[in-house]
Image (tube, helix red, strand yellow):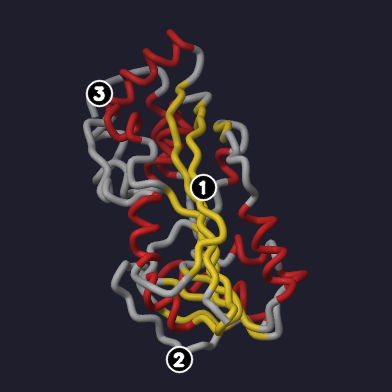
Amino acid sequence: MSHSHPLLSTWLAAERQPFSGWDFSYLDDKVINELPPWSYETMVRQHMSLAQSALDLGTAGGEKLLEFKDVFPPRLVATEGYIPNLELARQRLAPYGVKVRRSEAALAEILPFGDSEFDLVIDRHTGYNTRDVERVLRPGGVFLTQQVDGKSLLDLFEAFGDQPHWPYFNLAFALERVAETHLVVELAQEWTGKKIFNDVAGLVYYLKAIPWIVDDFSVETHLPYLLRQQERLEREGQLVFHEHLLVLQTRKPA
């Protein structure tokens, strides 16, 4: 790499930082996330404390699910499709009696479970098949999901000359899928807020950890873009991008 920007070594060090599961603690002092008006965690906690059986779709490394360990129902199962996370989740969740099954996050995925197995299905930021979620829910059961809109962080994509991979996915799309089932919508809300980076090193780490934002991202291949963001940071004092989230709660008729 021929460029000798004074911050280059800092950016390369951020790129080499390990990332596993869904643990972004490295960014605690580098990123400010505005929060949506709802609390997915509070809603999960309320429903889980009443459930006898629950399923967590796309549990990543299981770290989010473990936040609810004090209200785990008698039967709790999780799925994960990414192999490194699958092993990590199994290690973390096994002491709590939680089985983790391999299952891809996809709109057409058939879940490896029988009909009417769960009182509660939760899903944080993982693709899902609405019809199949309905199938595995018991009558009266709840499906609760928080999702990232397909055009979330569009300004970040564009800053690196890229485009979103799932631009069609939004609340309207999710509700159209629900309309093809018998599920009843109890909550449907969307929100746009700021994701603020205090330095470019944090941005490097974030883009490396989430590879579907900028394809084949590395400090070396995307150095001109990083330099432009550094100039912007010096001009504006922080790097502001816009995140778009949605929350959806549906119930299977009793």
Q: Nearer the viewer, mark 3 or mark 2?
A: 2
Q: Amino acid at mark 1?
A: Gln
Callouts 3 and 1 close, C-beta under 8 Å: no
Badge 3 or badge 2: first in the primary sequence: 2
Location of residue 3 in the rendering, given as x and y in whole percent from the top left corner: 26, 21
Residue depicted at 51% across the width and 33% down the height: 193
For the residues bearing labels 1 and 2, Cβ distance under 8 angstroms: no
Name the element at disc 3.
helix
Please, which residue is most extreme toward the right here? 70
Give the numbered dot on residue 114: 2
Gap between marks 3 and 2 measured at Cα: 51 Å
The quadrant of the image that shows the C terminus is bottom right
Which image quadrant is residue 97 in? bottom right
The answer to whether 106 is drawn above or below residue 238 in the figure is below
Q: Work out whether 140 lies above or below 162.
A: below
Question: Which disc, if any, is residue 15?
Answer: none
The residue that mark 1 highlights is 189
Residue at mark 3 to residue at mark 1: CA–CA distance: 38 Å
The circle on residue 224 is 3
Query: Picture coordinates of residue 182 (x, y %)?
Result: 43, 74
